[in-house]
Amino acid sequence: MFLNNLLNIRMIKTNIFLLSLSLFVISCTKKPAGTDSVVGEPQENTADIDSGTKYELDLSSSVITWIGSRPVKQHNGTIGIKEGFLVSKDSSLVAGEILIDVPSLDIKDLKKDSENYEKLKNHLMSEDFFHADSFPVARFELITLVPYDSMIKIVDKEEFPSENSPALLSEFMVKEPTHSVTGNLTIRGITKSITFPATILFRNNKVYAEAKFNIDRTEWNVKYDDESSVIDKAKDKFIYNTVNVGFSLQAIREE
């Protein structure tokens, strides 16, 4: 009897130790919201948006920017917005949608009438990257908005160093974020949720939103596919996966 009790006690202690170890590992490996490349499964917006206040995006004052990097060169540009709206309730955004016009992508560091501009633009629109013929519209759907926690430590995703390494999130993000935004981003028909810091202000019947964050292009299959040649796959290794993305939005309250 004594031996059985002793074995049971040891087993209980062992189980407690294993449970504690598991919780420790989970707490150390879980990536907190607001860190670089926070990507997950699509989420559903459960907010009652019909009772909210709608704001239409002012397309003349709203822009999406991007920076793509290789060790030998960086390219930067904009991409147009087809339409979009935001919905507020109790002085906070609860929903929204931005439809992104993929073929409108512009490369700002190259002359528009140059051979290099046309070559790069066609390449980005091809099946190797955005596959714009089949997926001409990308989409961002706002799911949740919470006050930004300044105590969260930004964990940067390191890339191999070069003169043109993409900017780290801690360097690139807006300087005084007010909120953490979570939304579903759809590119090439692939939808994943992302979380990033943003500054959002309400002023004079308008909403101003600014965000700068990083995404991993391979999460949306923006890369040479499995049927690409060995040479093309090798080229892809010399393109950084990290893309710097910026949103600068203005939306006007509907009358």
Image (cartoon, rainbow, N blue to C red):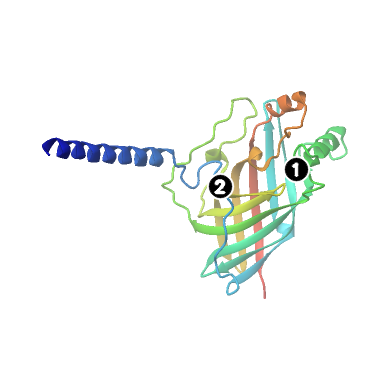
Query: Left or right of 171: which side holds 186?
Result: right
- Estimate the x, y position of residue 224 in percent, counting from the top left: 73, 33
* Residue 237: quadrant of the picture: top right
Mark 1 is surrounded, within 10 Å at the Cα level, by few (under 14), some (14 to 19) or many (20 or more) other residues, namely: many
Circle 1 is placed at which residue position? 130
Q: Is residue 155 above or below residue 204?
A: above
**Secondary structure of residue under mark 2:** strand
The type of residue carrying mark 1 is: Phe
Q: Which quadrant does the C terminus fall into?
A: bottom right
Q: Residue at x 68, y 43 (%)?
A: 66
- Estimate the x, y position of residue 48 in percent, counting from the top left: 56, 70
In whole angstroms, how far apart are the C-alphas of marks 2 and 1?
20 Å
Q: Is residue 57 above or below residue 235?
A: below
Q: Residue at x 67, y 72 (%)?
A: 254
Circle 2 is placed at which residue position? 40
* Residue 44: quadrant of the picture: bottom right
Query: Left or right of 121: which side holds 14?
Result: left
Mark 2 is surrounded, within 10 Å at the Cα level, by few (under 14), some (14 to 19) or many (20 or more) other residues, namely: few
* Residue 164: quadrant of the picture: top right
* Mark 2 or mark 1: whose residue is earlier in sequence: 2
Looking at the image, is mark 2 or mark 1 nearer the viewer? 2
Query: Left or right of 182: which side holds 107?
Result: right
- Estimate the x, y position of residue 63 in percent, counting from the top left: 70, 52
Discs 2, 1 touching: Cβ within 8 Å = no
Q: Residue at x 75, y 39 (%)?
A: 129
Task: Pick whichever, 205 or 23, lies toward us.
Answer: 23
